[in-house]
Image: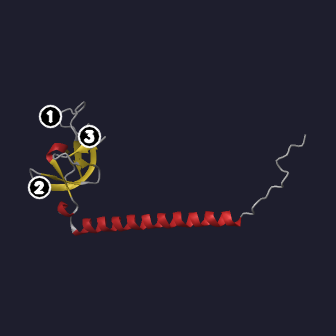
Amino acid sequence: MKFVDRRGKIIKEGDYVRYDNTGTTGKIVEISQNPSLKGNDNKNSRNLEGSDLTWVHVDKTELWYLSNVLELISVEDANLSKFEQSQIENNNDNKKDDEKDEDDYKTDMVEELKQQMKDQDSTELASNAGEGGG
C-alpha cells in the first residue's frame, strides 16, 4: 500500500517529514491506518478503529500525525543534529561497502564457476554409443 503526504508525494518508513503547523521535523517510524493506542488510558481519546485516515508516527516527538498535514523533506532539510547526520553518513557508507562486497562476491562466484567448468574433463562418447544392444 502506498501512502502520501499533503502534496501527494509517496512517503515510507525512514523518510523525513515536516509538520507545517510548527515546523517540527522528524523521521517516519511507522505508517498506519489504524495506529495502536495501547497503553493510552485517556478516556477522552478517540477510537481510531475503522478509520480510513493515514497516520504517521514521527520519531522526534513520538506523536502520530495525519499524513495530510505532513510534508516529505530531504535529509538536509530535516535540521538534524551533527550526531544524527554522522549516523546517516556512516549508515550510507556501510551500505556502499555492503553493495561492493556483494558485487565482489558475485564476481568471484562467476570466476570460480568458469574455472570449475574448464577443469572438468570433457567426456567423449564413442561413435557407437547411441546404438541399442538388442
Residue under label 2: 23
How are the residues colored?
A: secondary structure
The local secondary structure at tag 3 comes to loop
Q: Earlier in the sequence, mark 1 or mark 3?
A: 3
107 vs 45, left or right, is right
Q: Residue furthest front?
A: 127
Q: Amino acid at mark 1?
A: Asn
Residue found at x 30% / y 64%: 88
Q: Earlier in the sequence, mark 1 or mark 2?
A: 2
Residue under label 1: 44
Q: How many discs appear?
A: 3
Q: Where's residue 116, x and y in %? A: 66, 64
Mark on residue 39?
A: 3
Distance of mark 1 from mark 3, alpha carbons? 14 Å
Camera-nearest residue between 19 and 76:
76
Residue found at x 34% / y 65%: 92
Q: Where's residue 80, x and y in %? A: 20, 64
Q: Earlier in the sequence, mark 3 or mark 2?
A: 2
Residue found at x 19% / y 44%: 67
Instruction: Check disc 1: other Cα within 10 Å, few if <14, some if 14-19, many if 20+.
Output: few
